[in-house]
Amino acid sequence: MFVDRVIVKVEAGTGGSGQTSFRRERFTPMGGPDGGDGGRGGNVIVCADRNLTTLLDYTYRDAWKAERGQHGEGSNRTGRSGEDIVLPVPQGTIIRDAATQELLGEILDIGDSFVVAKGGRGGKGNAFFVTATHQSPREWQPGEEGDVRSLELELKLIADVGLVGQPNAGKSTLLSVISAARPKIANYPFTTLSPNLGVVPLSDHRSFVVADIPGIIEGAHEGKGLGLQFLRHIERTRMLAFVIPIESDDWQTELDQLRHEITEYSAELAAKPYCVVFSKLDLLGEHYIPDINAPGAFGLFAISAPGRIGLDTMLDAWWRQLLSMRAVEERPTTQDDAPLP
C-alpha cells in the first residue's frame, strides 16, 4: 500500500527535576548542599531512511514519545538525559505542524535530519543556588515539559523524469520495460492507483530515476479523477515526459490538455523541461513521429515499450538533458550572474 500523507502526534521527554540534598559524611559536619541537576528530556528527531518509499508504518502507530530525563541525585550527580527518539521517513518528506500548517522542514537527501520536538531542560538542584549569603539553600527546580505537537508528514517523490499522460497511455508498461519496477498493467483506465518509481540503468554505471503517476484527466487540477491526489509527486521531478498513445484520435488536443492541467496545477511545474513520447508504436507497424506543436520541447520520440523500439534513442536523450541541467545547476556563480542592484 502506498501512503503519502499521515498525521502523527509526537511528545518530547520532560526534563528531570533537580534534587535537594546535603552532604552527610563522617568528620565533615559542614558538608553543604550537593543536590544535582535533572537530566534533559529526549528529543524527537526526523531523519531520512533510504529503505523507505512510503509512510505506511505511521498508519499502524501514530503517537511517539521520547524518554524523560532522570531526576538529579545527591553528591552533585546530574540525572541521566532521556534517549532521543528517531522517526525514519522516505526522502522527499515534508514536515508541517498539523495545527498551524507551519513548514518545519523537508527531508530531501540521505543524512538529512532535524529536531521536530525539543526535550525539556532539566531542573537545577539546590547546589546551584548556593551564594555567599545563602549557604544552605533548599530551592530546586522541576524539569521543563517537552514539546508536544501534531505533525503532518507529506511525501513528494523525488525523481529525474516524471511520466505524465492520460489513463492507459502506456506509462506503466514503459516503466516496467526500462526499469525493474513492476507496476500493475491492465487494459482498463486507472490501473495505476499509486505512484511508482523505477531506476533506469544505462551503460557505464549511469542511471536515473523515473516516476509514473496515475492518469491525468481533464479537470485533474480541480480534483477530478486521481490527478490532484498525486500531481504533487511530479513537483520534484527534474523534467517531464508527456506520454501520448499513437492511436489517439487527436494528438495535439491530448498534449494541450495535459499541459493545461499541469499549468493550472503549478506554473513552476509547467516551466520544467519536457519532451513528448508517442507510445504503442507497434500498433502502426512502422516508425512514425506525428507532426505536433510542442513549443520548447527538447525532443519528440515514438516508441514501442514491449517491442523495445525507439527506447535507446529516447533514454539517451533523457540522459543528455539531465546532464545539461546538472551542468547549469553546478556552474559556479560569477560576478556577471549576480543580480543588478
Image: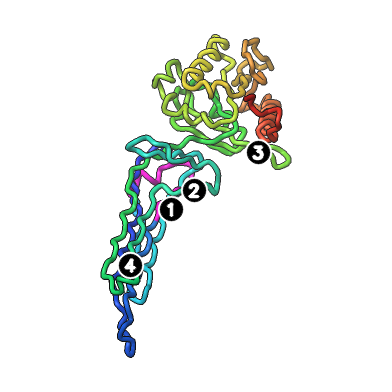
Q: Residue at x 63, y 26 (%)?
A: 339
Residue under pointer 1: 86
Instruction: Please name whichever residue, 341 or 134, is drawn nearer the observer in this view of the structure.
Output: 134
Residue 206 visible here: yes
Residue 103 in the image: x percent, y percent? 42, 37
Judged from the image, the secondary structure of the residue bearing numbered disc 1 is strand
The secondary element bearing badge 2 is classed as strand
Residue reaching furthest to the left: 138
Color theme of the render: rainbow
Q: Quadrant of residue 327?
A: top right
Which region shows up in magenta?
Answer: 43-63
What residue would you read off at disc 4?
A: 129
How far separated are the C-alphas under marks 2 and 1? 9 Å
**Distance CA(mark 4)–CA(mark 3):** 63 Å
Observer-nearest of 90 and 106? 106
Tell me how far mark 1 sits from mark 4, CA to CA. Answer: 35 Å
In three-dimensional space, the C-alpha distance between marks 4 and 2, rounded to whole angstroms, equals 37 Å
Q: Which residue is mark 3?
A: 207
